[in-house]
Image (spheres, rainbow, N blue to C red):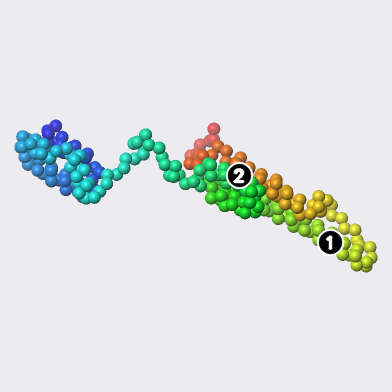
Amino acid sequence: MTATADYLARLEVALRDVPHGIAAEIRAGITEELTSLEPDAAEARIAQLGDPTVIAREALDAGGYAPPAAPAAARPDTVASPGSVPVSRSRGFAIAAALTLSFGGYLVPVVGWFVGVALVLMSSMWRTWEKLVAILVPVVLFGGLMLFSFAAFTTTGAVEVHEASGTGTPPEVENPLVPDLLLAGPHFLIIIAVAVVIPLSGLWLLWRMRGRTPQEPFPRTVSRPLGEEAS
């Protein structure tokens, strides 16, 4: 390989980070000049031109360009910034969300539970149906018990009013579906919903999250070609 060919090859490598238009002009000018000279004159001119990397750096500086940063894979000594992954996709965020859903209502009544709901909806560690189950089951159960208890108290109140009117012997009203425990008052219903159902919903989310990673929270389904039997 002649000195001219070697220099042009090194120039090609050095100009890879220079914008295409500028690099093409530099490459064409130097190539035309060197190829028009005799070998001895070409070697002397190469010595005057200097290192191709210096030429490339000067071209970048003159145009106000910054060389592109080296990719992270080419720098094993660097560590990815924690901020590169959204916080809502982290495992720690999901654990905090599930615990807030379970016990946030104890710290800040009502508001704490709603905060837990918002955090669970923001997390990407669960499927949509899992979030809906954890949030709606306590609400539906609590609402159903409240309606059931309200019907039982309404029936009891109607019997007491009938007795107070003195219009006769009131009919005996017995509903075997209404447990006596519900007649103790609405406080028992609140204890059931808050102390048992809501904490279990958050703990259920933690159980569902086992084995999942922030990058791939859900197992992939591998499709088989048509006609291939499962092993």
Q: Amino acid at mark 1?
A: Gly
Q: Residue at x 24, y 42 (%)?
A: 16
Q: Above or below — where is 42 with respect to 60?
A: above
Q: Above or below — where is 27 with respect to 164?
A: above
- Compared across the picture, whether 178 is left or right of 103 comes to right
Q: Residue at x 66, y 48 (%)?
A: 106
On the image, the x and y values in percent for residue 91 come to 53, 41
Which residue is identified by label 2?
99
Q: Earlier in the sequence, mark 1 or mark 2?
A: 2
- How far apart are the two marked residues, 1 and 2, measured between alpha carbons? 41 Å
What is the secondary structure assignment of the residue under circle 2?
Answer: helix
Crowd class of label 2 (few under 14; some 14 to 19; many from 20; radius 10 Å): some
On the image, the x and y values in percent for residue 191 come to 73, 49
Q: Residue at x 54, y 39 (%)?
A: 212
Residue 122 got which mark?
Answer: none
Asked if one can make out residue 82 in the rendered structure from this viewpoint, the answer is yes
For residue 50, which quarter of the picture? top left
Q: Are marks 1 and 2 in contact (CB under 8 Å)?
A: no
On the image, the x and y values in percent for residue 100 come to 60, 47
Q: Above or below — where is 144 with respect to 42?
A: below
Asked if one can make out residue 117 in the rendered structure from this viewpoint, the answer is no
How many marks the image carries: the answer is 2
Which is closer to the viewer, label 1 or label 2? 2
Q: Residue furthest front?
A: 107
Q: Above or below — where is 104 with respect to 158?
A: above
The N terminus lies in which quarter of the figure? top left
Which residue is identified by label 1?
157
- Compared across the picture, whether 198 is left or right of 71 comes to right
